[in-house]
Amino acid sequence: MTGSLFRAVAELGLRDIRKAFGETHVLKGVDLSVRDGELVVLVGPSGCGKSTLLRTIAGLELPDSGTLHIGGRDVTKAAPKDRDIGMVFQSYALYPHLTVRDNLAFGLRLRKTDDATVKERVDGVAKMLGLAPLLDRYPRQLSGGQRQRVAMGRAIARRPALFLFDEPLSNLDAALRAEVRVEIKRLHAELSATMVYVTHDQVEAMTLADKLVVLNGGLVEQEGPPLEIYERPATKFVAGFLGSPAMNFLEGTVADGRVRGEGFDLAVAGVQPGKVTVGIRPHDVHLDASGGMKLVVEVVEAMGFETYAHGKLGGVPFVARLEGDHRPGVGETISLSVTAGHLHLFDESDRRISVAPPASPKGPLAEDASLEVS
């Protein structure tokens, strides 16, 4: 960590934050805790409240009710300048008439920082972000990725307690997004900074976050480590939102230790009888000549190292990711099995149902949970 470049980090705490615009209730009681040095990513569909929540943390919006603390200090009604935050926007928000050097120094000069300190911090940030050769250029002379690094550097130079990122990579092409995403991850590790990051990009969310917070309809649907949420989604909404291609959903009924529906019949353990939704991720199925799940292929996407087969299972759309050299043809029927222990069941209220693991290596789910055509 570059201790000379960055100061102590701070915790963030939100309690029952509510915000409405007229009759539209955007935040409906959000609770959120961010530890010192943690990178928390907010994700969710358009209109879920993630950008409004970030603006509320920044002080650009004031909550109708609830409390907000940064570093143990109540800043619920504080102006943005009094919150000790650094914000990086989607649009970069650089001053076009200022050089990179002056853009990096702008926040410091606004606070009447002495010239020696300004030079030390600007030079340090420029070296950290690889901007030293660009200090005398203007924003119009930079690439998108370079502009975003300048925007990040301007925030870092101020040494705020908390960094806020509002979809900072959405204006970049795919290659630059990957490059700057790695840069942000490296910076977080180097600075040990507290960061809250808003994105609609699942790759960014899964790869950047220490803690992922999934918002839905103005509430926190689930939060936790990214892989934990991906592997054990608490609701059908979370299961369907995370993952690309999205999870497949099949309607079925549990009875006598099996779950059955149109076109499938598979063993489950420890699940009470009743109607359920079965969730299966595309990468949790594989080709199996003896498998009972028969997929009629309608579209094939060859991605080089993998192939996605889109088709119908019992009349329901279904996607399977296939590895290896086999690429089915359109109209072909392929047999599939489901990887053991990778079924997701949801009750009629769309909450996750716990599925018991295989009882032994020779149990019904030990090798594959083969779906049998009914």
Image (spheres, grey):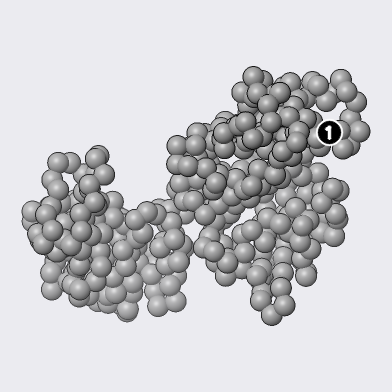
Looking at this view, is 363 or 218 the one in front? Answer: 218
Horizontal side of residue 51 vs 107, given as left or right: left
Quarter of the C terminus within the rendering = bottom left
- Occupied quadrant, residue 121: top right
Q: Percent position (x, y) of residue 203? A: 46, 46
- Whether residue 95 is visible, yes or no, is yes
Residue 117: horizontal and vertical position, in percent?
Answer: 85, 23
Residue 282 lies in quadrant: bottom left
Apparent side of residue 233 relative to residue 268 in the rendered image (left or right): right
Q: Position of residue 131 (x, y in %)?
A: 64, 24
Q: Amino acid at mark 1?
A: Leu
The structure residue drawn at horizontal position 21% and vertical position 44%, both measured from the top left corner, is 323
Is residue 329 left or right of 202 when viewed as pictured? left
The residue shown at (19%, 68%) is 313
Q: Is residue 136 left or right of residue 303?
A: right
Q: Is residue 271 above or below residue 93?
A: below
Instruction: Check the image and report above or below for 191 versus 209.
Output: above
Q: Nearer the viewer, residue 131 or 345?
A: 131
Query: SS of the residue at dot 1?
Result: helix
Query: Crowding at label 1, few (<14), some or many (≥20) Cα neighbours within 10 Å?
Result: many
The residue carrying mark 1 is 108
- Which quarter of the figure is the N terminus placed in? top right
Residue 38: image location, x then y, percent:
63, 42
Count the labels in the image. Answer: 1
